[in-house]
Every structure is written in C-alpha cells, then in structure tokens.
Image (cartoon, grey):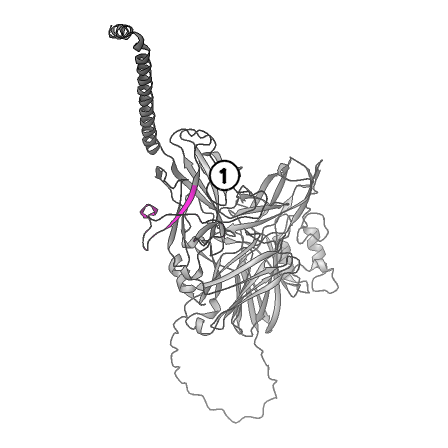
Amino acid sequence: MSFLVFVGIIKSMGKHSKILTFILLLSTFYFLLSVQAQASFFERIINLFSSVSEGPIQVSYRFFVPHDTLDPWDPWPPGTTLDLPENGYLSPMAFPPLPGQLFRLRIGIKATADWSASNRRLKLQFGKLSAGQTNCATITAWNDLGALGSGADWRGFDMPITQLANGAQITVNKLSGATIKGSYQESNPTPFNPAVLKDQIIEYDWLVQNNITNSSLDGEFYCFRMVNQDGTSLKRYSQYPKIATTKPFVNSTSSTINKNVGGTINMSNTNGTGLALVVPANYSTFSQSFDIRNLSVNDFLDQVGGQPSGKLGAHSYVYQMNAERNNVATSSFNENLTMRIDYSDSEVSSVDESTLRIYKHDGNNWNAQSTTLDTTNNRATTAINSFSSFGLFGDPTPTPTPTPTPTPTATPSSGGGGGGGGGGTTVSYPTATVTFSGRAYPKSTIILLRDAQVAATTVAGADATFSINLSSLSGGNYIFSIYSEDRDGRRSSLLTFPISVISSATTAVNGIFIAPTIDVDKNEVKRGDNIAIFGQSVPASEITITVSSEEDFFGKINTDKNGTYLYNFDTSVLDLGQHSAKSKAAYGGEISSFSKTVSFQVGKKTVLAKPVVKVLKGDLNKDGKVNIIDFSILAFWYKKTGFPAGFDLKQDGKIDLKDFSIMAFYWTG
C-alpha cells in the first residue's frame, strides 16, 4: 500500500519525477551495498572465530635418522637397537644430535574442519625451555626455523640429493592415523596444503640441523611446533617434539676413511690418555666421514643417570662417534671396527683393573662389550659394528682381607745320616690362562683358534652360552679367533682377538656374541618372488637382515626357542642382477657383529640352492651317521700315529679318550 502511494507521489511531481526516481534507485543501491558489506564483514568475523575454535591440532611426531630418500626408514638414533617410539622425545640418553648433525622430524597435524586445497601454508618454530622446566607450553619466545646457512640455533639444511627436493610431497606416512601426505621441508614455509577433511591428519617431514656452538651447549631442552605462515599458533598442541642438548664436548677429531683402504683415527687427550679407532678395508659400500667427540664422563653420567650398576668409572671421558656420507648417517658397517681406549694408572687407582670392560650405552642401559685387556700398556680393546656412546668401567677394588700370622712350629732335629743320592731339581716356569665366554647357538660347536691353529673346542649349552679355557700358555702375543657351527653345519663369521698374554695371569674375554649363521633357499630368484633368508642365533633374539642393493633394505624377525629364524623377502623391490644379504642379532641389550654375506641373483627364473649337507663330527666313514663302525675305526687308531687328520676330533695331535668323548656326544646309533 505504501509503495503505491510512493509511486503516486513521484508521478504527481511531473518533470522532476525522473530525477527523484534516479535518486531513489541510487540510494537503494548504496543501502543494499552497505548491507552486503556488513554481511561480508560479519561473515569474516564469524569465520575468524570459527577458525580459532576449529583450528588444526599438532597431535604427533617422530624423530628419524636423515637418509637420502623421501621415506626415512630408520627411527632415531642411528646405529643402536633402541628405536625411539612415536611421540618419544630425544632425552640425553637417546643420543641427541651434536652440533652440526642433522635429523628428520615427522609432525602430524589434525584438521578439526575441512581444509580446501591451497587453503594454508605452515612453518616450523623452535623455543628453549628455561632451566628446570619440562613443559613446552611454558615457552613464551618462539623462533622460526633458521634459513639455510643462518646463525640460528636450529636451521634448515639443503641436502644435496636430487630426490630430496624442498617442498616435495612425501611418499609414505609414518605416524599413526596419518592419511594425508604433506611435504618434505628443508626450510620454511610449506607449500599450500592438499585437501584435508575434518579429523584427518596431514603429515610433514622436516630436515633440521643443530647449529648450536659447542660453548653454548648447556644440557637444556628445546621444543618444536608448527604454526600458520603468519606466525599465529595452531588451536592446540597435544604433542611437542623435544630435544635435549649435551654438555660441551672436550675434544673432537674427524677424518674421511677410504672404503678400499681403511685407516686409523686417533684422539689424544690432555691427560695423556687417548682413543684409537681402526677401520678395516671394505668396511662400507662407500667411503665415510668419521667424527669422534669426547665428553667429560661426569657430565655424561649426570645426564644419563649414572654408571653401570655396581661399577666405577675407569676413564675420564665418554666417546661419541658418528659416520656419514653426504650428511646421511651410517647405521652399521660391513666389517667390525676396532676401538681401543688408552687409560692411565691414576684413572684406575680405585678400580680392579682385571675387571675393566668397555661399555656401550644403548639409550636405556649400559651394556658390557667383549673386551681385551692389556694391563701392561693400559689398553682396553673391543670390536664394534655400530656407533653409540662408549665408556670404560670396572669393579671397585676389593678390600684386602688381613692374612693371619702363622704359628711357628718346632722343626725336629735330623740325625746324622750318610750322604743321600744327588736328586735332580725340577724348575717350574709360570704359565698363563685365557678364558673366552659368551653366546653362540644352542648346542652348537665352538672352535677356538690360536695363531690360525685349532686350540680348543666346546659345545654351547641349550641357552646358547659357552665358555672355553686355554691354559699352560707362555707369556707373549697371540691372535685368537673363534667361530661356531650351527646345527646344520653352517659356520659363523670369524671373531678375532689380538691378546698380549702375561705369565702367571688369567686373561678373560667375556661377553662374546657370535654372529648368526645365514643362508638363502635360492641361487637365483625370479623377480617378484620371495627368497627365504634363514639361519641360527641365540633363542628369542631379534635378527636384523640387510639386503644390499643400490639402496639397502631391512627386515626384522625374532628367533624361536631353538635360535632359528626364517625371513621371506619380497624381491619385487630389487633390480635384476646380483644382490647380497647379511644378518646380525640383538639380545639383552647386546648386538652381534654381522654374519657372513650370502649372494643371490634376481633374474627371470628361479634356481633353488642345494641344501647344506651336514657332516657330523665323528662320522669317519661319511655315511651321515655316527655309530659302531666309526667307533671301530677310531679304536683302530687309538694311541697310534699317522692317523688321517680328520680322525683327531679334539685336534690336539693325538687320539685318546677325549676323542671318544666327542664321538659319544654326536652318537646317532
């Protein structure tokens, strides 16, 4: 009704009606535009509050060793059996990266509302906790991850590898529940996101370098978080990646070792002690850059919670080592490296020197290593196959027990007798004893060599433990070697121990961990088929299998109660051609060296390997049995000379009852 009246008024104005109509329409347009603008403004306000209440959440993370692929396969730290779990922070015991070292950090971000594609970009920040603080949420000063080459404490790093391009989409999600693949980042910010639905988790991968100067290391913690590109925080942080720093190291040395030649790295300490690392030829597929640093043993023990139970420190330093190629950390080696710690008399003044052993920290506990002692020259030596933190410890010096004063007794007088016959005088020369003990395989044969000759044999128990004593040795230098044969006749790799034997003393080599045996069921396998990799080790141990190609592939499996293992490897990931496999065992915090290497061909057909024919010890006529026939043969040669070498079961140069005892052990009837 009012609209019609309004139109009538306009018509009554005659020639001015057009002007009024125009003004009316213009006013209406501006009014509507104003309403729309207000609506847009309020819509933006509503969206802003909505984005705050429904913003993303940082829900998970995991640290990885830097490698040259988009898929980091080795959880931090490198070279140990300890794998930090998801949402496991880098404590002082977890070998936090030292200045200059790199790590990969996967972070999961959960969307609480749908993200359209290209909706947002994110970046990484770090902050330092105040002394005594543990909650990352208390940090008020956050810093962006430093640009490449910057002076920031934590900065990005340009990995010089083609497949690791900054901003490339990751290929595999590693975090629980993550289904959306974000990007690999060497610097801030991330690219625009792919589409993410509500409650989905997108995963990002950051390559970070520790750039803290040694003098600034104070043992405190740093935390990491992702934020929006403009620096505003996410809605919530249910998990913060956290890294401890070490105390300042005392000394460091580095060297690049040629893979074909090997070499030795020496570190001299100010107190006259030192460390030597002997790297053999063919230790790795590629030449590596080695870095050794030592820390005050007291600083290190303060951070990790003390020395091995019941032991005392016997050296002023703990050594941390690292090997890498093109900034990619090396987790293990093809051959054992020899590490020697030179200690001083003053360092062991309160320690029973005969109990000294090198210990390796696995991130949770100290684990004693098989150690050769040279107490004359104050040297402790061990073989290592991966890096960690190493220290020297021993038992406290026992309190001496007072010796009671003997009561003198009267000596009866001797009657005058005739001169006795001139009896000869027997001169006794002091001799030495060496003992070897450790783990092999259940009821396996252990063979000990002295200077490449069989010196002794024994049989391991059902739990795979063994002990061999070798006595009546003259003082001097020897090279002892030890290996084992599994129940199918396969031999382990050889462990070698150069030992300086001292007369009238016993040298103990404890904690030996013989490498697993290994074999494959095919000489050639059709690409895409499985190849069985199997062998024997300690019961209930964890076997790590490495299949070597241009890129190494890894698998893990546990042994059964008999120590046997079998791993079916899918060859579809391998190129056509020659490949090899090796294995090592972990048990009770200790790690064996690698096994022998077995080779196989990946081709277009399958060729089965011939099964190993086990020759039983004592099977003298080679008929696969040890029975009365073999007994008769051995009886013929009893205490005779000129017998065939294989008939001397004890390998002591004669045939006696000891050889019959060995035959009885292998008796099949």
Q: Is residue 449 above or below residue 84?
A: below
Residue 148 part of the magenta-drawn span = yes
Q: In this rendering, would 403 be left or right of 474?
A: left
Q: Which residue is mark 1?
A: 183
Secondary structure beneath dot 1 equals strand
Q: Amino acid at mark 1?
A: Ser
Q: Is residue 284 above or below residue 124?
A: below
Residue at (66%, 60%) from the top-left corner?
A: 261
Q: Which residues are magenta?
A: 123-152
Comparing 128 with 39, the one in front is 39
Category of crowding for the residue at label 1, using alpha-carbon neighbours closer than 10 angstroms: few (below 14), some (14–19), many (at least 20): many
Residue at (72%, 50%) from the top-left corner?
A: 622
Q: Is residue 111 above or below residue 63?
A: above
Q: At which x and y percent is residue 87?
A: 41, 43
Comparing 515 with 57, the one in front is 57
> Is any part of residue 86 visible from this angle?
no
Q: Is residue 530 above or below residue 23?
A: below
Q: At which x and y percent is residue 90?
A: 42, 50
